[in-house]
Image (tube, rainbow, N blue to C red):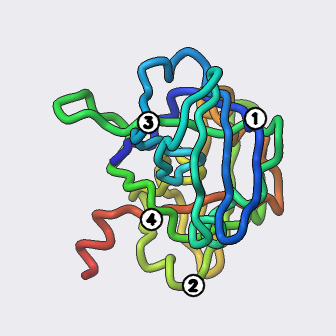
């Protein structure tokens, strides 16, 4: 389980495709020095398991279903990614409950930028709109955000300068794909 509060940006070191599997190597920086094989790390919001650590590179095995549902299939060497270690029991909790189980890709339909204000209007699969409510939570590329408006064919999120600076969302533009995880509490309530 995660919080959607990005700890660090990492960089794709290598990516290798095999039959029904992708091997992803990330340079994660010093914040992950205590990371060990078997740990869960959210990479752009997708929960991945550390399979190997060698020469300051964390390696993950990504299964076919994850590649189909997320934007991880679009990663290339040198690209930045949002990283968050799994939540520790008894630790401080910010953001919202994030499972790391990406529901689907969304598309940034519109990026509105004003001084100290950026709004993304994101379109998602119709099945996800029922989990999106104004002032509710949503996870976009691993970032915990508050839902603004919910319209027929998009929802809005608003980004503060800090979020734009410390996450990959600052580089996103119109037509870019992002990983979307709907709020788990909304799922339970509707179920």
Q: Position of residue 115 (x, y in %)?
A: 75, 32
Q: Is residue 74 left or right of residue 94?
A: right
The single residue placed furthest to the left in the displayed view is 90
| Tag of residue 37 | 3
Q: Earlier in the sequence, mark 2 or mark 3?
A: 3
Quarter assignment of residue 167: top right
Instruction: Find out whether the residues at labels 2 and 1 contact each other: C-beta distance under 8 Å.
Output: no
Q: Residue at x 28, y 79 (%)?
A: 190
> Label 1 neighbourhood size at 10 Å, few (<14), some (14-19), many (20+)?
some
Q: Position of residue 169 (x, y in %)?
A: 69, 42
**Count of number-bearing discs:** 4
| Tag of residue 182 | 4
Question: Which of the pair 185/26 is nearer the observer?
Answer: 26
Q: Which quadrant: the C terminus? A: bottom left
Can you identify the residue that label 1 sits on? Answer: 13
Mark 4 to mark 1 CA distance (whole Å):
29 Å
Can you identify the residue that label 2 sits on? Answer: 126
Up the image or down, 81 lies above or below 126; here it is: above
């Amino acid at each position: 389980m995660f919080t959607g509060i990005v700890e660090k940006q990492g960089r794709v070191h290598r990516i290798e495709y095999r039959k029904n599997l992708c091997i992803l190597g990330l340079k994660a920086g010093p914040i992950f020095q205590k990371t060990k094989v078997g740990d869960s790390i959210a990479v752009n919001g997708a929960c991945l398991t550390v399979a190997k650590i060698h020469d300051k590179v964390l390696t993950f095995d990504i299964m076919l279903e994850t590649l189909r549902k997320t934007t991880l299939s679009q990663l290339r060497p040198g690209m930045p990614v949002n990283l968050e270690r799994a939540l520790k029991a008894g630790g401080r909790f910010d953001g919202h409950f994030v499972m790391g189980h990406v529901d689907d890709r969304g598309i940034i339909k519109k990026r509105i930028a004003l001084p100290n204000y950026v709004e993304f209007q994101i379109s998602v699969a119709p099945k996800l709109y029922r989990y999106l409510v104004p002032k509710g939570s949503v996870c976009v590329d691993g970032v915990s955000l508050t839902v603004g408006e919910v319209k027929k064919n998009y929802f809005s999120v608003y980004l503060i300068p800090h979020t734009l600076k410390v996450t990959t969302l600052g580089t996103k533009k119109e037509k870019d794909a992002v990983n979307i995880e709907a709020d788990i509490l909304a799922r339970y309530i509707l179920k």
